[in-house]
Every structure is written in C-alpha cells, then in structure tokens.
Image (spheres, rainbow, N blue to C red):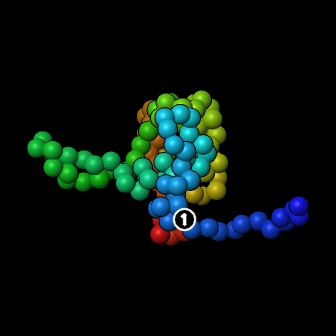
Amino acid sequence: MEKNTHSLNWLALGAELIDCLRSKGNHRLTRYDAFVWMMEHIQKGVAVRDADGVVINTAPYSASYKRLAEDWNWERHTVQSFIEELTALSVITSKRQGNVYVFFIGKKSYKQLVL
C-alpha cells in the first residue's frame, strides 16, 4: 500500500456529514466531537430571557474547564490542553471571567469555519 504524503489543508463539512461522523451514544467524546460541540455552542450562544421567558438577547457561550470535562467525559487537564491548542491555532479565543471562560470563534477563522 502506498503511503499518502499529501496533507489535507482545508475541508468543508456539511451538517449531514458532521452528524454522520459524530460518535453515537452517551460516552467520552472524541476530539472531533468536542470540537464540533464547542463550535455549535459558541455559534449558538446562550439565550437571555426576560421574566416571561421571552428571548431578549443572546450572550456568548461560557463554561468552566470542569463543566466541559463533565459534558465531554474528559479529564479537566485534557480539556484545558485541547482548548489551549484551539486557541493557539486561532480557531477560538477565550476570556476568563471569574471561574468560567467566555468563548468566541477566532476572528481570523470565523469565515473559514462557519459557512
């Protein structure tokens, strides 16, 4: 079998393919699953509701590394390393606010990631 010496530089995935590639079930997320999960949460944000439950605004997504570790079924230090890798690649940015981090899609990658 011939070894592939070419690397993939860019790839766009549609919603159906992303869903197909996701791990199924309620277990530890793969790095791919965690990445897609994070992109979905950052893109969607958090709905801010008034006293009647009507959405009045959307706040940026925020979470602690501990919370992400619980959601992804990872160790906290693994979450931190993964987030630091995504930040170093300028895929996302984060800003610490107390015990949580507020996450944003990286300015340079926004047009490339969210089509």
Percent position (x, y) of residue 110?
A: 50, 65
Q: Residue at x 50, y 65 (%)?
A: 14
Residue at far left of view: 52
Residue at far front of view: 1
- Residue 90, image quadrant: bottom right
Please indicate whether residue 94 sits to the left or right of residue 86 in the image.
left
Please indicate whether residue 51 sits to the left or right of residue 103 in the image.
left
Percent position (x, y) of residue 12?
A: 57, 68
Disc tally is 1
Q: Residue at x 52, y 61 (%)?
A: 17
Residue at far right of view: 2
Percent position (x, y) of residue 22?
A: 54, 49
Out of 66 and 16, give the one closest to the viewer: 16
Q: Residue at x 19, y 53 (%)?
A: 56
Mark 1 closeness class: few <14, some 14–19, many ≥20 residues within 10 Å: few
> Which part of the image, by quadrant, shows the N terminus?
bottom right
Q: Amino acid at mark 1?
A: Leu
- Residue 52, image quadrant: top left
When the figure is inspected, residue 18 is found, relative to residue 49, above or below; the finding is below
Out of 96 and 82, give the one closest to the viewer: 82
Please indicate whether residue 4 sits to the left or right of residue 17 in the image.
right
Q: Is residue 96 visible?
A: no
* Residue labelled with disc 1: 13
Q: Is residue 41 visible?
A: yes
